[in-house]
Amino acid sequence: MQTHQTEQQDRYSELQAPSSQLQSEKESSNLIRPQKPLNPLTASRSHQELHKELRMTHKRRVSQEGKTELQRVLEKRRWEQRMKASRAQEEAKKNRSPLQQELLKRHQRLEKLESDKGQQQEGPEFLQVKERLRRTAMLHAEGKEV
């Protein structure tokens, strides 16, 4: 259908175009048209392969959230280190004896008590100093009475 329409348009344009213009078009179609000379560098096979590789790597980089190769390698290393550390911790937990487990529980409980004690004692520093002075004063007073 399109070819039929294009043929009709060509006929219509030929009817309206002056005869001198038709002759010049026919002559120009017989002439050799100049072509841009090939650049030997871009025409070489190695250059084309390098250019293709560059385009591919560029596409890959853009598709990977715009991160450079160095950033990706560093992230991979960090991830591997974290995984290795977590595996080591899991192995250490599996290999603990019952005595070590109990000691660890006790240590954690003591740390928790100390942190709770530290939070309770938090307050203005002058009150803490005053309390310490009272304790020392009581100790000295008790010592003299004995």
Image (cartoon, grey):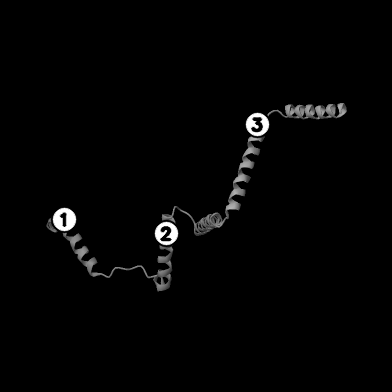
The x, y position of residue 76, in whole percent, is: 50, 58
| Circle 3 residues within 10 Å: few <14, some 14–19, many ≥20 | few
Q: Could you tell me if residue 44 is visible in this image? A: no
The structure residue drawn at horizontal position 82% and vertical position 27%, both measured from the top left corner, is: 137
Mark nearer the viewer, 3 or 2:
3
Q: Could you tell me if residue 16 is visible in this image? A: yes
The x, y position of residue 93, in whole percent, is: 55, 54
Mark nearer the viewer, 2 or 1:
2
Q: Secondary structure at mark 3?
A: helix
| Circle 1 residues within 10 Å: few <14, some 14–19, many ≥20 | few
For residue 104, above or below residue 39: above
Horizontal side, residue 40 vs residue 124: left or right: left
Horizontal side, residue 9 vs residue 120: left or right: left
The x, y position of residue 98, in whole percent, is: 57, 53
Mark nearer the viewer, 3 or 1:
3
For residue 1, above or below residue 41: above
Amino acid type, residue under disc 2 in the picture? Arg
Horizontal side, residue 113 vs residue 128: left or right: left
Say which label, 3 or 2, has the lower sequence index.
2
Amino acid type, residue under disc 3 in the picture? Gln
The N terminus sits in image quarter: bottom left
Give the residue number, with chain letter if any, for mark 2: 60
Give the residue number, with chain letter if any, for mark 3: 120
